[in-house]
Image (cartoon, rainbow, N blue to C red):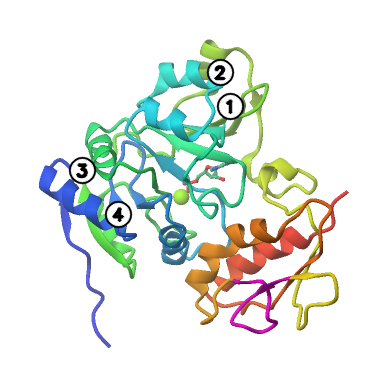
């Protein structure tokens, strides 16, 4: 048994360290970095395999959508549509601990796994100037949920991150103790009326002072409540799970070459690759009013549990 080896810890304020981090991120690797909220476990948000590595490292039992971090407001609204409310709160609270859920802009490069298949993207311009300098250096949106294993508390120091012993983490950028120490407020401004999805240090009252009355939505309820199609991705076509053959008239989503489907999530049976391709694969086979998607069995181990969770939701009856 070898001892776990911690990744190097370098100062976020050091431009050489940020350059090294940016190179790792652009190559699809994982870098943890300080923001004013909590430490984030970062990966290139446009790279579906890199996003899959985040879920693998955190051991998340399901794929919830990730927040993409960018250096400035202009970069944010290149990714998601700027509604009037979005512009107003961005002006008031960015850079800062507020995440905005926006409709995907045309040509938005954020990977489908990053947004968990949704037509909306969650974007934040962090308050930490050093974090923004890193993001500017990367030149791409960086997906970064809190840098803790699933079920553990969010890290607010570099030491907390090191203690998580993430297997594929290549570098930790230390920005000291997080000033806010709480996850960002999440506000959905993709629709007619803003909806608060997650409370945080930017308060409801502060937001309402800018845009008027907003709706309050229990976030987990929104993601799991049946019939709330906007809150999690479901294909238009029916989905049949645990298929051992593709029936006449069906299209096949395969895993490890079991059923000879049009798309194979991973011919070699690699669950990281399968996670990376899950939402783009479903989308590619999903034609409105189209053929049932027969899905080969995926083993319920490691990332397979999160893949199966999403597949079960995709197959759930809806009215
Ligand atoms: P984390 O990155 O772990 O701080 O969590 C991100 C939070 O933002 C979670 O609560 C997500 O479910 C939420 N979120 C991210 N993207 C979306 C989206 N497109 N629609 C709704 N909620 C989102
Ligand atoms: Mg967290």
Nearest the eye: 246 or 276: 246
- C-alpha span from label 3 to label 1: 32 Å
Where's the N terminus, which quadrant?
Answer: bottom left
Write the residue at 73% across / 54% down: 235
Q: Of the numbered discs in the image, which one, if any, rests on residue 189?
A: 1
Nearest the eye: 186 or 275: 275
* Residue 116, horizontal then vertical, whole percent: 58, 52
User: Cβ of disc 1 within 8 Å of ligand 1?
Assistant: no
Q: Are marks 3 and 2 in contact (CB under 8 Å)?
A: no
Residue assigned mark 3: 176
Is any atom of residue 199 visible in this view? no
Numbered disc 1: secondary structure: loop
Residue assigned mark 4: 25
Nearest the eye: 266 or 11: 266
Q: Which residues are magenta?
A: 252-264
Frontmost of labels 3 and 4 is 4
- C-alpha span from label 2 to label 1: 6 Å
């Amino acid at each position: 048994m070898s001892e776990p080896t911690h990744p190097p810890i370098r100062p976020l304020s050091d431009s050489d360290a940020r350059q090294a981090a940016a190179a790792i991120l652009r190559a699809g690797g994982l870098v943890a970095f300080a923001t004013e909220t909590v430490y984030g476990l970062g990966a290139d948000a446009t790279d579906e395999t890199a996003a899959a590595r985040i879920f693998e490292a955190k051991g998340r039992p399901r794929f919830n959508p990730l927040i993409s971090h960018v250096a400035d407001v202009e970069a944010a609204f290149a990714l998601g549509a700027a509604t009037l409310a979005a512009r107003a709160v961005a002006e008031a609270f960015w850079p800062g601990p507020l995440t905005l859920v926006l409709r995907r802009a045309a040509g938005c490069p954020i990977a489908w796994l990053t947004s968990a298949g949704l037509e909306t993207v969650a974007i934040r311009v962090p308050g930490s100037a050093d974090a923004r300098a890193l993001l500017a250096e990367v030149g791409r949106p960086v997906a970064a949920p809190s840098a803790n294993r699933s079920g553990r508390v969010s890290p607010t120091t570099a030491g907390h991150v090191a203690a998580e012993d993430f297997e594929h983490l290549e570098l930790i950028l230390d920005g000291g103790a997080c000033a806010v120490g709480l996850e960002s407020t999440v506000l959905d401004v993709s629709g007619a009326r803003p909806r608060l999805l997650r409370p945080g240090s930017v308060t409801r009252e502060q937001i309402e002072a800018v845009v008027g009355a907003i709706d309050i939505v229990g976030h987990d309820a929104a993601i799991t409540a049946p019939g709330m199609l906007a809150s999690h991705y479901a294909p238009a076509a029916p989905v049949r799970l645990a298929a051992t053959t593709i029936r006449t008239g069906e299209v096949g989503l395969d895993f490890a070459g079991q059923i000879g489907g049009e798309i194979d999530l991973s011919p070699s049976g690699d669950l990281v690759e399968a996670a990376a391709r899950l939402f783009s694969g479903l989308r590619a086979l999903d034609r409105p009013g189209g053929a049932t998607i027969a899905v080969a069995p995926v083993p319920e181990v490691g990332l397979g549990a999160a893949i199966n969770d999403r597949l079960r939701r995709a197959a759930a009856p809806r009215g």
